[in-house]
Amino acid sequence: EDNVEDEDNDENQNIMSLVLLIAQAFASAKDYENSLDYYEEHIELLESNTPENEDLLADSLYAMGNIFAGMDKNPDYELAIEKLMECLDMKKKIFGSDDEQIANVVYSLATVYEKAGHHDKATESLAEALRSFKMKQNKAGSVKVYHALARLKASKAAELDSLPERVAAIECYEEALKIRRQIM
């Protein structure tokens, strides 16, 4: 009887893996509607499976959030934020707040906040991601965040015709360059 249960579990794992691969393939082909359908199915399969694999579930939510934000036509930033927040909550529960995976999700959340016009939330999220990347001495992550902060500040400087924001943008670009040179 245990053998039959193991075979069923293996088959469920195979199906879940295939559904995930199809979701990823549709996303790569920019067929977002089909991709999202398969991610939904993947999440349903994960939730019905015991024990639930929360890390895989969080990864699917992460992918869906990025798809909603990155769609060529009619991106849905609010839905993207909702999926990324769900992912963030799960990842924090699994790995704790200081894990680099958390910093990557927070960075993605910041880019969605920026696209949605929530510049203060974007800045807060980028600062949080930067703290984590610096703490883990992840230079590539730090460069990515400094670059995003610079872009955000440059856009705010242009919008407000603000010299302090322009100077802050330049400082962020210079910091990104300094770290980038350390990597090489």
Image: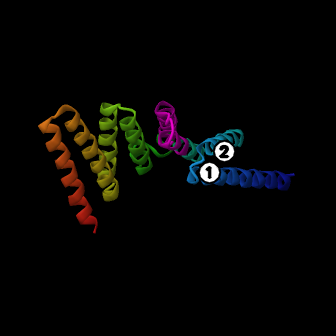
Asked if the magenta segment contains residue 74, the reply would be: yes
**Is 3 displayed left or right of 111 in the figure?**
right
Q: Which mark is residue 26?
A: 1
Earlier in the chain: of badge 1 and badge 2, it is 1
Q: Which mark is residue 38?
A: 2
Q: Label 1 crowding class (10 Å Cα cut-off): few <14, some 14-19, many 20+?
A: some
Residue 89 horizontal/vertical position (percent): 49, 36
**How was the colour assigned to the protein in this rendering?**
rainbow
Residue 161 horizontal/vertical position (percent): 16, 34
The magenta segment: 63-90
Viewer-proximal residue, 8 or 127? 127
Q: Residue at x 24, y 65 (%)?
A: 182
Q: Quadrant of residue 139?
A: bottom left
Going by the numbered disc 1, the residue's amino acid type is: Phe
Eyeballing the image, is 30 above or below 177?
A: above
Asked if the magenta segment contains residue 95, the reply would be: no
Q: Are marks 1 and 2 in contact (CB under 8 Å)?
A: yes
